[in-house]
Image: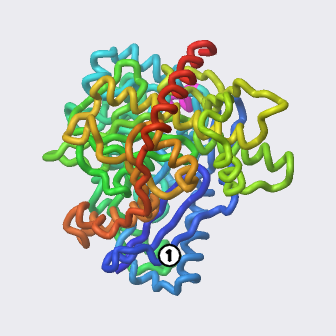
Amino acid sequence: MYFLGIDVGTSSVKTTVFDAEKGISVGKASFPSTEQRIDSEKPGWAEQDPETWWSNFTAGYAQILSTNQIDPKSIAGIGISYQMHGLVALDKTGRVVRKSIIWCDGRAARQGETAFQKLGPAFCQKHLLNSPGNFTASKLKWVEENEPSLFAKIHSFMLPGDYIAYRLSGEMTTTPAGLSEGILWDYVRRKPSTDVLDAFGLDHSLIPAVVPNIGIQCVVSEAISLSLGLRAGVPITYRAGDQPNNAFSLGIQDPGQIAATAGTSGVIYAISDQDVVDPSSRFNTFVHVGDTPSHKRNGILICVNGTGALYSWLNRLFSVESGRVSYTEMNNWASKIKPGSEGVLFFPFGNGAERILGNQQVHASLHGLEFNSHHSGHIVRAGMEGIVYALQMGFSLLHDNNFVQGENANTPHAIRAGNANLFLSETFRTIFANVTGKALLLLETDGAEGAARGAAVGSGFYSSSKEAFQTLKVIQTINPEPHTMSLYQELFGRWKSRIETFR
């Protein structure tokens, strides 16, 4: 029995067909071959066209079927993963009103701060575990204030994954986890937060129907079933933002377990069974995809915006200089440079305001460069080190303040990551293990496969999430080396001390 997984990322849409009986993926695709366009009309803005996500999904889906000779009528369920915090607005006919304001767009911070002051810190910390900040609800308020003619057309708003579910089913729905990402979930009352909507002056009817994170959410429409070759009534049974889904994909379910990603952004994501909040909003708590009324599961998310974004920028820069340069070549350059990059320091904060720095936009910067002794390899390795140093600031928040509770909280056996993006680099993996001082467990999975496994759970094929991940393969365990770990502790201290000089 097959399950379809769709992962709507910032740079591409990945699609997987998963054989649940064998526990393996039988077909994968990623579209486009180059990165999806991000439109930035003004500094700090970031938008994408939702229709592009749908087109890239259908292209990848068609490729999988033709390449692997898969009968689409054998697909029994669909799971969706997606880039978090984006705003998709639909009119009453289901047409997109404007481009999606995506996760790294910083324009709505003022609207979020106004709502935070109106609701009050005590209420926000108790009921929302967050400030409205620059998340989805604040973005919707920005549209009302700045594009009133477009806002007047909005019938429902949703997140990117909700939009894909809508295109598949024709039904406008969202989930508790999705609402929490938009800062529209009340953790005390366990329902959508009408208080936040009231603070923004937004109509309650703008929230679509709420369906479970895992379970029957809606079914594929007759028209889409015909166009995709699916049997009638295939259910959508799983939906999660990319970071909760990444943790789910890695088999992380219990309090104290930690996942890491290094895609366009870099993320530390830890599971907790407590409602925890950081008054400074350096991390954010969201409803985890595995949450149920009887088993509370929250995800503590720490984000560094400029991770893969930095690496992609370097790739474009070096490609302009010397023709097309591959990421493999860049990884090879970095592997030949010693830890510390011979004094070059890279601060990867060039992709919007950084939460771990108090929501400041400090910009990226390069320090210690010597024209006569440093070359591209030093810059690439310094970029890798800077990314991991920034992520280590997040780990420090978790451990120094005891924000994660559970048997694995203080000494997790290993930090888990998928074999994707920057974790494809042996050099990056080694830097990561030695800077964090924790073993890195690298697993053969990705977001689309995780969504497909989730669909199998939601459809009832698997009796539990634990059963769904019994076939998950460990590729490599990278342990920190005591001498290198000690060296990186010193190097990280130097790097961190420089931040205060330009904040």
Looking at the figure, which quarter contains the C terminus?
Answer: top right
Q: Quadrant of residue 32?
A: bottom right
Please give the name of the residue rendered at 40% of the width and 38% of the height, measured from the top-left corner: 437
Q: For this view, does 238 lie left or right of residue 160?
A: left
> Magenta region's main secondary structure?
helix
Q: Is residue 47 above or below residue 366?
A: below
Badge 1 density bin: few <14, some 14–19, many ≥20, Cα 10 Å? many
- Which residue appears farthest toward the left when viewing the image? 294
Q: Is residue 1 above or below residue 208?
A: below
Element type at marker 1? strand
Residue 337: percent from the left, percent from the top? Answer: 67, 42
Q: Is residue 123 above or below residue 88?
A: above
141 magenta-colored: yes
Can the viewer see residue 185 in this picture?
yes
Please give the name of the residue rendered at 39% of the width and 66% of the height, measured from the top-left corner: 452
- Which residue appears farthest toward the front when viewing the image? 483
Give 70 or 303, whichever is nearer the viewer.
303
Please give the name of the residue rendered at 27% of the width and 34% of the height, measured from the top-left corner: 404
Give 382 or 82, whichever is nearer the viewer.
382
- Residue at numbered disc 1: 27
Please give the name of the residue rendered at 73% of the width and 47% of the height, measured from the top-left corner: 315
Q: Quadrant of residue 214?
A: bottom left
335 magenta-colored: no
User: Magenta residues?
Assistant: 138-145
Residue 150: percent from the left, percent from the top? Answer: 59, 38
- Residue type for callout 1: Gly
Residue 11: percent from the left, percent from the top? Answer: 61, 52
Looking at the figure, which quarter contains the N terminus?
Answer: bottom left
Q: For this view, does 176 lie left or right of residue 419?
A: left
Q: Quadrant of residue 237?
A: bottom left
